[in-house]
Amino acid sequence: MNSGLLLPFILQIAGVGVIIAEIILPSGGLLSIAAACLFGYSLYSVFAGVSVTAGWIFAAVDVVMIPILVIVGLKLLARSPATLRKRLSSEDGVISQSSELEQLKDMDGIALTDLRPSGAAEIGGKKFDVVSRGDYIKKGTTITIHSVTGNQIIVFNKRRL
């Protein structure tokens, strides 16, 4: 190998490594800028130190190699255990709503804190985080559970009905 091509070749390999790191690590684009600088200096070194023909060969390889690396890297990242799964299901152990919460509908309770609109309430002898329907409810007020959506318990002031 021509000794003038050693540094540009090492810079190209380093640029590939930085692109892979950019796919894995969140850097806000700083690693992309570093990779662009590595590739740019590599091309400058080839054009200035070796020949224009070798420079164009390096540039053509970069034009083909960089998009392929990005696509392959993203596909590998999508299959890795570090990424989030596409779906969450009860088979995977995910419970979106406690069965205990479903049974609370239409029960009465006491607001343990001021609800502005969220706070705490005692319902059936247990403490729950609750949300009013937008009303301000004072501490100690009797409340009724209007609905349960997900893990959110929606209540209203019983006296207003």
Image (cartoon, grey):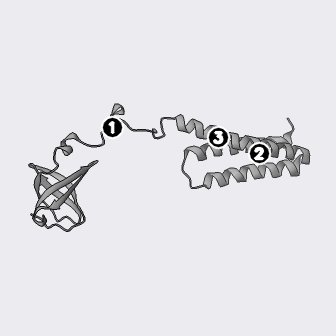
**Residue matched to label 2:** 63
Which of the labelled discs sits on residue 71, or is there none?
3
Separation of residues labelled 2 and 1 (CA atoms): 44 Å
Are circles 3 and 1 on residues that touch, CB within 8 Å? no
Q: Earlier in the sequence, mark 3 or mark 2?
A: 2
Task: Name the residue nearer the viewer: 145 or 44.
Answer: 145
Q: Is residue 57 left or right of residue 17?
A: right
Q: Position of residue 31 (x, y in %)?
A: 62, 51
Residue corresponding to mark 1: 94
| Residue 103 seen anywhere in this rendered image of the structure | yes
The percent position of residue 55, horizontal first and vertical second, equals 86, 47
> Could you tell me which secondary element the residue under label 2 belongs to?
helix
Tell me which label, 2 or 1, sits earlier in the chain. Answer: 2
State which quarter of the image contains the C terminus: bottom left
Q: CA distance from mark 3 to mark 1?
A: 31 Å
Task: Determine the residue positioned at 55% across, 38% down.
Answer: 77
Q: Which quadrant of the view contains residue 93?
A: top left
Front position among marks 2 and 1: 1
Residue 92 as seen in the image, left or right of residue 81: left
The amino acid sitting under disc 1 is Val
Q: Residue at x 64, y 52 (%)?
A: 32
Q: Nearer the viewer, residue 5 or 79?
A: 79
Identify the amino acid type marked 2. Val
Q: As displayed, is residue 82 above or below residue 159?
A: above
- Residue 99 in picture, x, y percent from top left: 21, 40
- Image coords of residue 154 (percent x, y): 22, 56
